[in-house]
Amino acid sequence: MEDLSYYTDKLADWVIHFGPKLVLALLVLWIGFKIVHKVVTATDRALTRAKLGQDIRPFLISLTNILLKVVVIFIAATIIGIKSTGLVALLAAAGFGVGMALQGALGNFAAGIIVLIFKPYKIGDWVEIQEKFGQVETIQIFHTAITTPGKKRLIIPNGLVISGTITNYSSMGMIRMEMEVSIPYSADFPEVKRILMDVLQKNPLIKKEPTPEVGILEFDSHSIKVTVRPYVEPDDYWKVFFTTNEGIKAAFHDHDIKVAYSEGVEYGDIGK
């Protein structure tokens, strides 16, 4: 009976001492979470009005919700009597450990935020990232996915995206193709240029403005390298590339223009 009386007294003392603090802490949690919900809802509406991207808005809302709730729990724990210095030290140690374990992922995460906010490209754009050319399929927090003309899906970490040069071909509404044609030194270049320009003008997918460019690129040991530079819509790039090559081959055959070779024979007909 004495032991029971002792523990009963201890329990009563604990209730008298911690009861009001516990009730107050629970009240703070209840009211605090209500306030957090309202703040998060208002933030979501504000971000929606600001037309922030669908990829980043849910993340920012979730992050805001978590941070505010951590603050509320921190306040409630302090009311109960848990020392704030201990909580801060515990959170700092946990944050440091997680940060070290996820160092690379956090770098890609931060880079993803930059990409989503500053928008150097958007879904559907034709881009060149890390020397990889393709169309942007998705933009995520940690990576960007692009689809190459050969239908390969490339996943590029956002840390690599912002660490190099990003070439956005769709931002200008057109892309300049870079094609090369080899002709022998005996060929009449003005005539070759006229033929090439005629091929380009007959292709309806090639833009008339800016005017396509045809010029001598360099003088090789066996041939003259001619560059052909038409402007096209990014989505038409490969279709124009193949049809233009076919048109050049047919035009050279029709006008008996030879093509230089580097192995043994100086030049010859490329055939129909």
Image (spheres, helix red, strand yellow):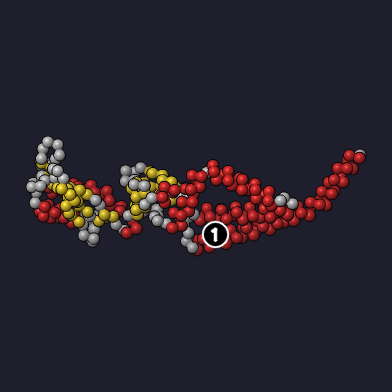
The residue lying furthest to the top in this view is: 264
Q: Residue at x 10, y 37 (%)?
A: 265
Q: Is residue 195 left or right of residue 12?
A: left
Q: Is residue 72 left or right of residue 99?
A: right
Is 160 in front, or is 47? 160
Quadrant placement of the N terminus: top right
Which residue is under mark 1?
Answer: 44
Is 29 in front, or is 88? 88
Q: How many marks?
A: 1
Rendered position, 243 above or below 117:
above
Q: Residue at x 19, y 51 (%)?
A: 217
Quadrant placement of the C terminus: top left
Is 54 in front, or is 21? 21
**Other-residue count near label 1 (Cα within 10 Å), few / some / many at <14 / 14–19 / ≥20:** some
Is residue 250 something one can see in this rendering?
no
Q: Residue at x 15, y 39 (%)?
A: 262
Is residue 168 something one can see in this rendering?
yes
Q: Where residue 27 sits: x, y (%)? A: 72, 56
Q: Where residue 64 sits: x, y (%)? A: 57, 55
Q: Residue at x 23, y 61 (%)?
A: 209
Q: Where residue 182 sits: x, y (%)? A: 16, 46
Q: Where residue 21 sits: x, y (%)? A: 76, 54
The residue lying furthest to the right in this view is: 1
Label 1 sits on what residue type? Asp
* Kind of element beneath mark 1: helix
Q: Is residue 19 left or right of residue 155?
A: right
